[in-house]
Amino acid sequence: MTARAVMVLGCTSGAGKSWLATALCRWYADRGLRVAPFKAQNMSNHARVVALAGERSDAVGEIGSAQYFQALAARAAPQVRMNPVLLKPETDTRSQVVVMGRAQPRLASMPWRERSRLLWRPAAAALASLRKDFDLIVIEGAGSPAEINLASSDYVNTRTALASEAACLLVADIDRGGAFAHLYGTHALMDERIRAQVRGFVLNKFRGDAELLAPAPQRLHEMTGVPTVAVLPMLRDHGLPEEDEVPRADDARAGPRVVVLCGPHASNLDEFEPLRPVVSLSFSRDPVELASADWLILPGSKHTRADLAWLRTRGLDAAVHAHVAAGRPLLAVCGGMQLIGQRVEDPLGLEGGIGGSDTGLGLLPLSTRFAAAKRLARTRHRFASLDGPWAALSGLEVEGYEIRQGRSESLSPALRVALPGQPSTSPSTSTASSPHRPDAAAAPLGWQHGPVLAVYLHGLFENPAVVHALFGAGARPLEAVFDALAGQVEAGFEPGFLMRLLEQR
């Protein structure tokens, strides 16, 4: 049998498609269905390393973080078929194109419409393959299906909806205002074939008196023939990371002030979400806020050299140096580690300018060199003996992932290796992990010097033991997050509607 499909479309970006799709994955999985998420194309620098479909067991690729978490919510092993195309922005006009988990450089310079025609082929094949292996596909759309300037090349919404024969939900963010106009206008402008597949409107991020909604849902039903089937509340602490935006701050929360310095090309910001319940977490470019940080984090970067130049132009390099000089902890992850070293070399011009070389911030005696080969891996490692603010991590085993173009080497034998490249022999418990290949990761993955800890391993704070060791408290388990989201869906939709949705073709 071919799997049924439910598709979550949005009137705008940020309407709530990702979290609703995640909630539906868990809700339907709780009913005994084999559920898989799908998004034909994601545009985000928040990515995860997952298994490649149909290849050797240790082969891995990249997908967007949203589909990674949706797969976990569905109790399915995350894999590249669930997000066959991932665009990772490098500048305002250029993105790295990842197809079925692997970067395809030749596609980056191709015109949008021509490229879309090519990308639909692997996306359609991935969707068809998933439909053979699962009972239900929960599909997330992208942006809005009413972008009439892009309608001829919209395979993420229109072609996917048609190919999957999905029962579609259209979501609007009522907190922004104009939700009923958004729903009406989007419904009117979308492809008429998809309009026929829309089974219900969803009002998301509602707060206030529900009685004030009338008579708008009824009038909208009369004008469009589509009922409003759910009113979902404003969820400020739902526990999921943002799909591709800079996350909001938690200024009012008690605990140490942890500030993530977000450059223009900051990536994988979602990995810091587990800190939110236990610290005051913010994502900032404000020198005043950086100066008040108890802990400072330099995250990954999709364009290390450009972010390094941006830091200096803004004078934020001085704020980073002042933080370290005061003895306060600094964590630098991946691209963040590269830019605090002595130099960054880019002989192939992967980040622009053939033979480019930049002087880093000089906080660690490290040299980074970019190479054509991209390293993707999920592994376990054990911290060496550390001191100062990082002493609590000594000997701790952690699981994480690597997504990087560069390789860094110490320029001083006195520099302390914090994270040896050889992982422990314990097998990983992650559903998306792959066996370690010693020859590929023998070099150190992290170093410490005083208050500075620099690592290539993403996902440290997704290890509860790390959060507890550093901050004395545990993060909210993901299973609890998924169950709570399913509970919101159960309470917000009309009784019986979601199961009836599967009966409609």
Image: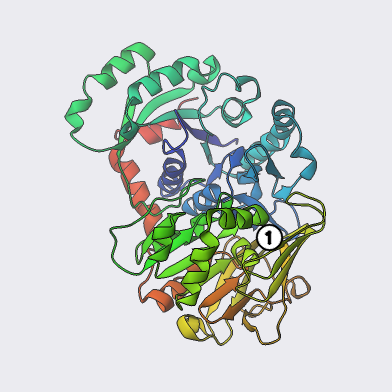
Is any part of residue 223 visible from this angle? yes
Q: Is residue 180 above or below residue 96?
A: above
Lateral position of residue 492 relative to residue 4, left or right: left
* Closer to us: 314 or 416: 314
Q: Position of residue 306 (x, y in %)?
A: 65, 52
* Closer to us: 85 or 444: 444
* Picture quarter with the N terminus: top right
Lateral position of residue 236 relative to residue 331, left or right: left
Lateral position of residue 70 relative to residue 308, left or right: left
Amino acid type at circle 1 is: Arg
Q: Position of residue 202 (x, y in %)?
A: 36, 31
Q: Residues within 10 Å of mark 1 (few under 14, many from 20)?
A: many
Secondary structure of residue under mark 1: strand
At 29% from the left edge and 35% from the top edge, which residue is drawn?
495
Q: Position of residue 466 (x, y in %)?
A: 46, 74
Q: Position of residue 141 (x, y in %)?
A: 53, 34
Residue bearing the label numbered 1:
404
At 47% from the left edge and 34% from the top edge, which residue is drawn?
13
In the figure, residue 105 lies in which quadrant?
top right
Q: Is residue 65 above or below residue 136?
A: below
At 53% from the left edge and 51% from the top edge, which residue is drawn?
71
In the figure, residue 137 lies in which quadrant?
top right
* Closer to us: 236 or 436: 236
In the figure, residue 404 lies in which quadrant?
bottom right
